[in-house]
Image (cartoon, coloured by chain):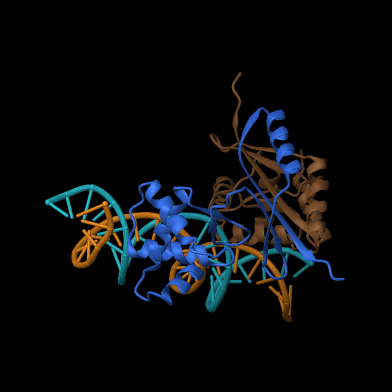
Chain colours: A brown, B blue, C orange, D cyan
Amino acid sequence: MRENFDIEARCKQKSVRLTDQRRLIAKVMSEIENHPDVGELHKKISEIDSKISIATVYRTVKLFEEAGIIAKHDFRENKSRYEKAPDKHHDHLIDVNTGKIIEFTNNEIEKLQKKVAEKLGYKLVDHRLELYGSKIKK
Amino acid sequence: MRENFDIEARCKQKSVRLTDQRRLIAKVMSEIENHPDVGELHKKISEIDSKISIATVYRTVKLFEEAGIIAKHDFRENKSRYEKAPDKHHDHLIDVNTGKIIEFTNNEIEKLQKKVAEKLGYKLVDHRLELYGSKIKK
DNA sequence: ATAATTGCAAATGCTTTGCTTGTGA
DNA sequence: TCACAAGCAAAGCATTTGCAATTAT
């Protein structure tokens, strides 16, 4: 718990000025279970501070993301989702029926991606891998 | 060349009614070199028929996509890009400096994706893999 | 003090839609 | 003929921005 202190610490470290609003957004981002979009985030935050503007939430997630404090994902929706910057890189599997997001890592795939890029004459600077699947029933 | 006949043939096959506008969109989609967004597509089409509405282009690419005639991609932009439905599946490497899109296939990665999904209890129904890279200078 | 941040509402950019007129099979 | 398609403008949605008031350092 108290993981929000983590985000606050990283803000100081990056000279990101802390305000009540930012502290609150950091706290909610830390405690939230999944990968919220801005609307969901704002809704949750509003339950604590009803005066906070959605524009502030937009500005703050952008700020945090640019500082590498949280990560932004664009799955197959017309909006972005966010998560605390993960310690270790991972990719996502999305349940096509429920929308549930599962994180995974696979080193073999990572290596192959790098190899593919190099073969094409490119240095791999980033990638996006999403698997879409439906649950296998027993 | 005359690849547009391909799209037209597939329209008939799927009982997609052909109109002058759809024929034109099919033709331009067939001849275009890269992965256009709707704005680019509409611009190109307008050079031939200036009366065509962008709403029609939106409706048509959606229709073609749902019929499996063309494919839609959402790279890291706030708009979608389209390409003729490829005969064989492939993924994309995007040049982060120029925006150039390079197609590639890698069977090993494909197999690993399937394996990963299964290990998580899912049947892989689709995936998205994009590599972002910068050109290696000699 | 003062440069940065907030809230609000208006603006933006892509995409969709309601409605009337036009058209392919 | 007549269900479906096109054109136009308006509406939708997520996101951004201008500006005046507020706040952190």
Q: Which residue is situated farthest in the right direction here?
A: B138
Please say if B51 is above or below B85: below
Q: In the depicted view, which residue is nearer to us: C8 or B72?
A: B72
> Along the horizontal axis of the image, is A81 left or right of A126?
left
The residue drawn where x is 36% and y is 70% is B52
The residue drawn where x is 76% and y is 44% is A90
Please say if A100 is above or below B5: above
Whether residue A53 is visible to the viewer of this picture, yes or no, is: no
The residue drawn where x is 48% and y is 68% is B41
Please say if B28 is above or below A84: below
> Along the horizontal axis of the image, is B42 left or right of D8?
right
Q: Which image quarter holds the C terminus of chain A?
A: top right
Q: Which residue is situated farthest in the front direction here?
A: B1
Whether residue A134 is visible to the viewer of this picture, yes or no, is: yes
Residue A9 image point, x, y percent: 81, 53
Residue A95 image point, x, y percent: 59, 36
Q: Which image quarter holds the N terminus of chain A?
A: top right
Residue B65 image point, x, y percent: 47, 51
The number of callouts visible is: 0
Residue A41 image point, x, y percent: 59, 48
Q: Which residue is situated farthest in the top direction here?
A: A138
Please say if A1 is above or below B51: above
Q: In the depicted view, which residue is nearer to us: B91 or A97?
A: B91
